[in-house]
């Protein structure tokens, strides 16, 4: 699979002087972190547009006359089915093309489609608008993951990816608080338009500020010819650790989205919290707890790997977080007597639940060659979003519907508690992945 550096330059389409100038720019920590900050801000926008629908749940359900199960489809399946379908071919494109440009175009598409959600008049129209959001967002994360891995040294990779991954909970924080105010003082349609349109400006910033880095730049590795599409897929699937890791991440996300997408509805319906209190309390707790947990997961994994030299920590940290989150989450849903205590207690499970993402992405990149990183991220995200985002909210919503006759408003409480227990299955796959991850990383190609 290896080629010479000259051949790698031909793949990149750059003159030597242009490549040298880009390398020189990225040697400055200030520019590296500027690019990381821009990509992280883009990811915040990604999750604001993806997740703002959750705090708008009750107004949408009332206005369009839909069920919890249908709302679960809108917040999960409508987005996830196209996101996962397009994610892999777009990632393949990113592995052989200019990643910066792909990210810029993707931002513009998902932002416009988010704004169009506000024009939906029924379930079907909103479903297809959310479908369009997924089209754009499919091109966001895999190319960004690949760029981050190329501009930061291997020993800082999990930490850098954890900073990028802060966009998940930063988006939840901004989307929840901002969405609550918009729906309180305007309506849910206005909320979609307001959160969607700033993405156009971000697309321009990415296009004209971010420089496309050479492949393997941070590790001073020679560029390589990209493998064929099916060759890359076969390579990933032959790695036992990757198979278990992808299923573990998918189940982890099943719980995260199955709970998170219904938390605003849970606090309002079960505990009677006003919409602005839901926005502020849930938004701040989930945002701050998730931000802290996501950064901590990447940082502590890099530190443990550096101290011990054992790459198994890329799996052990997510495994620990999964097990710890189970009793903490059950306490939130089953034992807390009012919404304010419930949302405060949610700080601990959301903190623990955030540890997994950056170590898992970093481990995935260590398993593959330079020209497979976007593809590897896309396959991981394919599993994570198809099972996690696609099925987690939908199944949780349909469980709530089925329990409603017996438990009334408490049906959602029990549905979310059952979803939490999927973490037991998730932990099994993390445990299996930990047994072969070290060997698979040692056998990774250039």
Image (cartoon, rainbow, N blue to C red):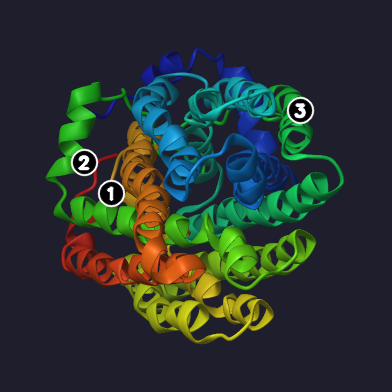
**In this picture, residue 187 sits left or right of residue 54:** right
Residue 13 lies, in percent from the top left, at 50, 12
Q: Eyeballing the image, is 345 above or below 40?
A: below
* Tag in front: 3 or 1: 3
Q: Nearer the viewer, residue 164 or 122?
A: 122
| Residue beneath disc 2 | 236
Horizontal and vertical percent position of residue 24: 66, 35
Q: Residue furthest right?
A: 185
- Tell which tag, 2 or 1, sits nearer the viewer: 2
Is label 2 in contact with label 1 (beta carbons under 8 Å)? yes
Q: CA distance from mark 3 to mark 1?
A: 38 Å
| Mark 3 or 2: the one toward you | 3
Quadrant (top left, top right, bottom left, bottom right) of the N terminus: top left
Residue named by callout 3: 197
Q: How many marks?
A: 3
Q: Would you say residue 302 is visible in this rendering?
A: no
**Could you tell me which secondary element the residue under label 3 belongs to?**
loop
- In the image, what residue occupies the spot 67% across and 55% down? 170
Q: Residue at x 46, y 65 (%)?
A: 412
Q: Which residue is mark 1?
A: 367
Residue placed most toward the observer, 331 or 104 = 331
Image height of 444 relative to 298, above or below? above
**Contact? badges 3 and 1 (CB < 8 Å):** no
């Amino acid at each position: 699979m290896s080629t010479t550096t000259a051949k790698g330059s031909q793949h990149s389409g750059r003159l030597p002087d242009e490549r040298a100038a880009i390398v020189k720019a990225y040697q400055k920590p200030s520019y590296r972190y500027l690019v990381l900050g821009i990509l992280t801000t883009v990811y915040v926008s990604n999750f604001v547009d993806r997740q703002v629908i959750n705090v708008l749940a009750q107004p949408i359900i009332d206005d369009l006359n839909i069920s919890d199960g249908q709302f679960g489809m809108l917040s999960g399946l409508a987005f996830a089915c196209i996101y996962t379908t397009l994610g892999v071919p777009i990632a393949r494109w990113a592995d052989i093309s200019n990643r910066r440009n792909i990210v810029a175009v993707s931002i513009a598409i998902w932002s416009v489609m988010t704004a169009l959600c506000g024009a939906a008049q029924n379930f079907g129209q909103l479903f297809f608008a959310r479908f369009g959001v997924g089209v754009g967002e499919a091109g966001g994360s895999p190319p960004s993951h690949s760029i981050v891995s190329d501009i930061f040294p291997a020993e800082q990779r999990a930490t850098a990816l954890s900073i990028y991954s802060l966009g998940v909970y930063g988006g939840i924080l901004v989307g929840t608080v901002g969405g609550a105010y918009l729906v309180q003082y305007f309506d849910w349609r206005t909320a979609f338009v307001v959160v969607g349109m700033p993405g156009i400006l971000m697309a321009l910033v990415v296009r004209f500020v971010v420089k496309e880095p050479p492949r393997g730049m941070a590790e001073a590795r020679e560029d390589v010819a990209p493998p064929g599409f099916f060759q890359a897929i076969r390579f990933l699937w032959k790695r036992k650790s990757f198979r278990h890791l992808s299923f573990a991440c998918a189940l982890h996300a099943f719980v995260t989205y199955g709970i998170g997408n219904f938390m605003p509805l849970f606090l309002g319906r079960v505990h009677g919290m006003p919409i602005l209190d839901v926005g502020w309390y849930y938004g701040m707790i989930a945002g701050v707890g998730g931000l802290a947990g996501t950064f901590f997961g990447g940082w502590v994994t890099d530190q443990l790997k550096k101290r011990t030299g054992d790459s198994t920590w890329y799996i052990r940290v997510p495994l620990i977080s999964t097990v710890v989150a189970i009793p903490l989450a059950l306490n939130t849903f089953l034992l807390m007597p009012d919404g304010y205590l419930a949302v405060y207690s949610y700080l601990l499970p959301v903190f623990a639940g955030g540890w997994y993402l950056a170590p898992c992405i970093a481990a995935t990149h260590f398993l593959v060659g330079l020209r497979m990183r976007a593809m590897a991220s896309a396959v991981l995200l394919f599993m994570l979003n198809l099972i996690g985002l696609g099925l987690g909210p939908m199944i949780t919503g349909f469980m709530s519907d089925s329990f409603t006759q017996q438990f009334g408003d408490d049906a959602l409480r029990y549905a979310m508690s059952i979803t939490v227990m999927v973490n037991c299955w998730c932990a099994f796959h993390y445990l299996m992945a930990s047994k072969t991850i070290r060997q698979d990383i040692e056998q990774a190609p250039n």
